[in-house]
Amino acid sequence: MTITLKNANYEVVLNTHGGEINSFRSVKDGTKYVFEGPESVWKYHAPILFPHVGRIKDGFYTYNGKEYNLVNNGMSRDMEHTVVEQTQTSATFELVQNGQTLQKFPWKFSLKTHYELKDDGLIFTTTVTNTDNSTMLFSMGSHTAFCCPRNTDPAGTTNSDYQYEFEKKEPLTTVCLNDSAQLATDEEGTAPCTKLYGEVQPGIIPIDANGFGNGHFFTKITSDWVGLRNKKDGSLIKVNTKGYPYVMVWQGGHGEEGVSGNGFNCIEPWDGASDAENTDHVWEDKIGLISLESGKSYTLDQSITIEK
């Protein structure tokens, strides 16, 4: 089921399947900001990642001696969420444990995602509450895909007319990944390992048809936001990254036969990381997990601001 939020500037369509944004458009000129499909290119739009982010090596982990199966980027993006609050400009979705989730993740929880339209964009937060009687170990993040180029861009605009931009313009530190997008290890078997990204202009990442493979993964971030800028008109879409330990960028839909105009670039604030390539699959040993005591809540903010 989808629901629509609308104010004087923007219209957002949200889906109970995954609790995600399906569409984010300008009311005034029809600009599409968030990738809307087709599924043949990518079946998601702005998925919420829980109870982990990134790759699960071999599709399983163990906890207290029991094996659990999870897909990459968690289960919440593939499950039905419930609308618990709704107004003309805001909505809150909730996913709670059920028989299906308990087969994949052994804790009881409430995952609430709140959306609220503002004059300059969209408040977008996720809150996890541990409703179990033991400390919960998890990670989470988001994976919003932004149209690039956009439907209202002048003829001839390509993805190379855009760039990623980190607020502080600091030299970037990248986390080393292997070809399977797992955390690469150093000679001593330690992960994560990092290196300077080596961008020509600090904090600026050009975009071109070559893409970013399985993604480029950054840490030691001091920027409060990471944005996607249109270099032709200067417009900027910003995603809040304040306090996040990691940010992933990824590109999809470009250069594929028959899908011209369906390109997108993702900005993904993550509070967690993929499995290491040498993981022992033990959940308690997984890198980047958050420890949340019984009855406590934890909130992430990945709000979107648009500057024209």
Image (tube, helix red, strand yellow):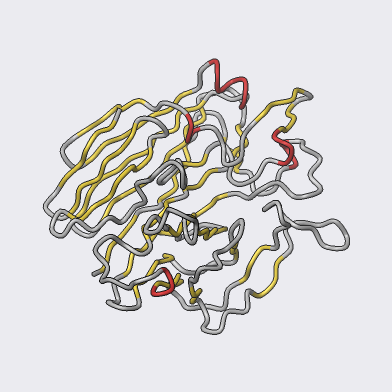
| Residue 167 in picture, x, y percent from top left | 42, 72
Q: Nearer the viewer, residue 144 or 168?
A: 144
Above or below residue 108? Residue 129 is below
- Is 89 on the left or on the right of 269, as rendered? left
Q: Nearer the viewer, residue 48 or 178?
A: 178
Task: Classify residue 159 by image quadrant.
Answer: bottom left
- Residue drawn where x is 77% and y is 36% of the image: 282
- Is 156 on the left or on the right of 204, as rendered? left
Above or below residue 87? Residue 252 is below
Above or below residue 144? Residue 76 is above
Q: Nearer the viewer, residue 299 or 2?
A: 2
Q: Quadrant of the C terminus?
A: bottom left
Q: In this view, which residue lies farthest toward the right?
A: 188
Q: In this view, which residue lies farthest toward the top?
A: 99
- Residue drawn where x is 31% and y is 62% of the image: 150
- Is 307 on the left or on the right of 164, as rendered? left
| Residue 111 in picture, x, y percent from top left | 44, 32
Task: Classify residue 194 by image quadrant.
Answer: bottom right
Q: Quadrant of the N terminus?
A: top left
Q: Nearer the viewer, residue 128 or 235?
A: 235
Please give the count of numbered marks on the rendered protein. 0
Task: Classify residue 197 by image quadrant.
Answer: bottom right
| Residue 96 in picture, x, y percent from top left | 46, 24
Q: In this view, which residue lies farthest toward the bottom?
A: 200
- Residue drawn where x is 40% and y is 52% of the image: 302
